[in-house]
Structure formats: C-alpha cells, structure tokens
Image: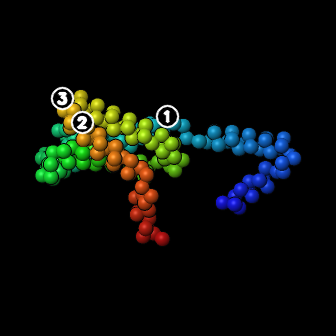
Amino acid sequence: MKDVKNDFESFTGNAGETAGSSFVLNKIHAEIARTAPKKSSVALKLGGIHLVSSFFSLMACPQFGTRLFFGGEGLMDVFMKISPMFCQAFCGAFYLAVTFILARLVLKYDEWLVLMRSRVLTIGSVALVSLGVFAMLARGISWEAGVFWIFGAVIAGEMASVSKMTLKKYLHFGHS
C-alpha cells in the first residue's frame, strides 16, 4: 500500500507544483467519473438478474402459492415438515439469496461496489418489491407470513452480499 501512495505522489509531482498536480488530479477524477457505472444501469441489471433468478426460484419453491412450472409443492413440502414459520423464512431466504449470488457472479466488480454502497436499501427494496408482487399474485398474505418471509429474505440477502468467499472462487478453485 505504501508503494502505491509513493507512486501516486511521485506521479502528481512535488507540493510546490500545485498547478500541474491539480490538473492531473482533475483529469483523473473526470476519467473515473466518466467510466464509473451509473446507479440506474446497475439497478436495471439487478432487476434483470432478479427476474431470471425469480424464474428459477419459483420452479423449485412456490412462494405464497405462486408457482411457474411443475406440479407439487417442491421445496415447500420439505420446509413445511419443520414448521410453517421456518418455511416462510426459508422460502424468503432462498428466493433472495439466489438473486444476490447470481448478481455477484454476473455483475462486474465496480457494479457490485455500487450496490454495496447502499446495501441496506438494495436488499430492502428488492425484498419489499418482491413481497408486494407476491401479495398481488397470492391474493392475501397474512401479516405474520410476510414478516417471516421478509426476515428470511433480508438475512439471506445480507449473507449473500457480504460473505468473503464468493461462488466465483469455488468455480475457479480447480483452475489454479
């Protein structure tokens, strides 16, 4: 880290050359601002990733009775054997974890950093919008079921977004 600081200081010049160094710094800031990902484009990408992950999640586990393909209860049958509250929380967790794991794999690092700067807002908005859509489709979600679903979704979204070991590392493990 000290080498980077020394390199930067030698690149920008001495303290006596403030005109040259401020010009260089302004150019660097302008270039970073020009190439940095926009929040709106990152939000659109996350929305697309969420739609794709929703498609696959709803094939495996019907959220509040909303199912895309296949008959039966899927993972819900397994979760309900433990308890209904566990089922609601784990269905929310499964649903949002798939979104954020897929987002970590698809988004570029600087796009991921844009999401992580407002992680609470990102996770909360995706969870609440999803719950709202399910409430419209399922025609009646109890308050208790919604709270457990949101709890599971937010916890899983947080865990998937801040864990140090990403799925990408697992995928590249054998290619060292």
Residues at badges 1 and 2 in contact (C-beta under 8 Å)? no
Q: Position of residue 20 (x, y in %)?
A: 83, 44
The label number, if any, that marks residue 139 in the structure image:
3
Residue drawn where x is 82% and y is 51% of the image: 13
Which of discs 3 and 1 lies nearer the camera? The answer is 3
Q: Is residue 43 left or right of residue 55?
A: right
Q: Is residue 136 visible?
A: yes
Which callout, 1 or 2, points at the residue further toward the start of the chain?
1
- Which type of secondary structure does the marked residue at label 1 adopt? helix
Q: Earlier in the sequence, mark 2 or mark 3?
A: 3
Which color mode does the image show?
rainbow
Q: Quadrant of the N terminus?
A: bottom right
The residue drawn where x is 43% and y is 60% is 165
Pinpoint residue 158: horizontal percent, then vertical percent: 39, 47
Q: Amino acid at mark 2?
A: Gly
Q: Tag 2: Cα neighbours inside 10 Å, few (<14), some, or many (≥20)?
A: many
Q: Dots 3 and 1: beta carbons under 8 Å?
A: no
Q: Residues within 10 Å of mark 3 (few under 14, many from 20)?
A: few
Which residue lies under the disc numbered 1? 40
Residue 59 visible in this rendered orientation of the protein:
no
Q: Nearer the viewer, residue 130 or 14?
A: 14
Marks 1 and 2, how far apart in space?
28 Å
* Position of residue 121 measured from the top left corner of the image (x, y, whole percent): 43, 37
Report whether 144 appears left or right of 111: left
Rounded to the nearest angstrom, the CA distance separating label 3 from label 1 is 31 Å
Looking at the rendered structure, the kind of residue marked 3 is Arg
**The one of 51 and 98 positioned closer to us in this rendering:** 98
Mark 3, secondary structure of its residue: loop
